[in-house]
Amino acid sequence: MRVGLLSDIHGELNGLEKALGLLDDLGIDHIVCAGDLVNGSGHNDMVVALIRERNIPCVMGNHDRDAPQNDAFIRQEEDTANPRFRRWLLKPATLEFLKALPRTKELTIGEHSILLTHSNMKGPMAYIYADSHPNRFTYILDEHPVDLVVMGHTHVPMHVKIHNSHIVNPGSVYRNRTGNMTQSCGIFDFETMQLTVLDLRDGKPLPYDKASFDEPLP
């Protein structure tokens, strides 16, 4: 079984459509999203509408969390706010959807358990990379002993293996913070327990950061 992975879309409708097209062409039946649907490009309402139309499970990213407050500020200060921010104004249905997103979401797909979280699950959202301290990963699995954790937030693809569990980040549909500034989505194959990160420009695999903690941790 393969699961399609999205994160950090940031209103990038063209990138989202490319990602969904790639995953559909590859016959991926299950797609999940690790948050940050809005703020970046100007098609926030349409991105949220497409996620809802496709019934893609999603969690709240920090930009989703802040969207209602940002929207209220722009409307209040409309005469003096920078006009470029007005493209971030959201429809009421979009705001209600973002407000209702959970910070974490556990799913069972087939025989496999999956946790979605934009970043760490408690306190301020932190940046978690493949070379972060092992405790960053083990505390997630201590509270949620799942087969797969799907994260976002860093815009840097990664795959971290801890014993029989895997923590992955598919990178950003909007823009990765890597040297080549690619846009990407991911596929996790539960048969091979491998992550594939796809370049949205041509559908070809991209390299990503890896780490493995199979020995007992201090």
Image (cartoon, rainbow, N blue to C red):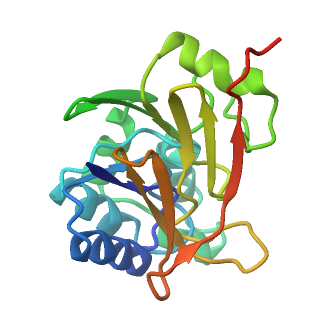
Q: Name the residue nearer the viewer: 84 or 45.
A: 45
- Provide residue 51's location: percent of width, then percent of height: 27, 57
- Provide residue 180's location: percent of width, then percent of height: 73, 80
Q: Is residue 165 above or below residue 45?
A: above
Q: Name the residue nearer the viewer: 125 or 21.
A: 21
- Provide residue 164's location: percent of width, then percent of height: 51, 27
From this viewpoint, which residue is outermost toward the bottom?
202
- Provide residue 209's location: percent of width, then percent of height: 71, 55
The C terminus sits in image quarter: top right
Instruction: State whether residue 202 appears in this view.
Output: yes
Instruction: State whether residue 10 appears in this view.
Output: no
**Left or right for 30, reference 141:** left
Q: Quadrant of residue 21?
A: bottom left
User: What residue is at 50 percent from the left and 87 percent from the top?
Assistant: 201
Q: Name the residue nearer the viewer: 13 or 194.
A: 194
Q: Is residue 131 above or below residue 113?
A: below
User: What residue is at 66 percent from the left and 61 percent from the top?
Assistant: 208
User: What residue is at 65 percent from the left and 19 percent from the top?
Assistant: 138
**Callout count:** 0
User: What residue is at 30 percent from the left and 42 percent from the top?
Assistant: 96
Q: Name the residue nearer the viewer: 85 or 16.
A: 16
**Left or right for 216, reference 173:** right
Q: Quadrant of residue 89?
A: bottom left
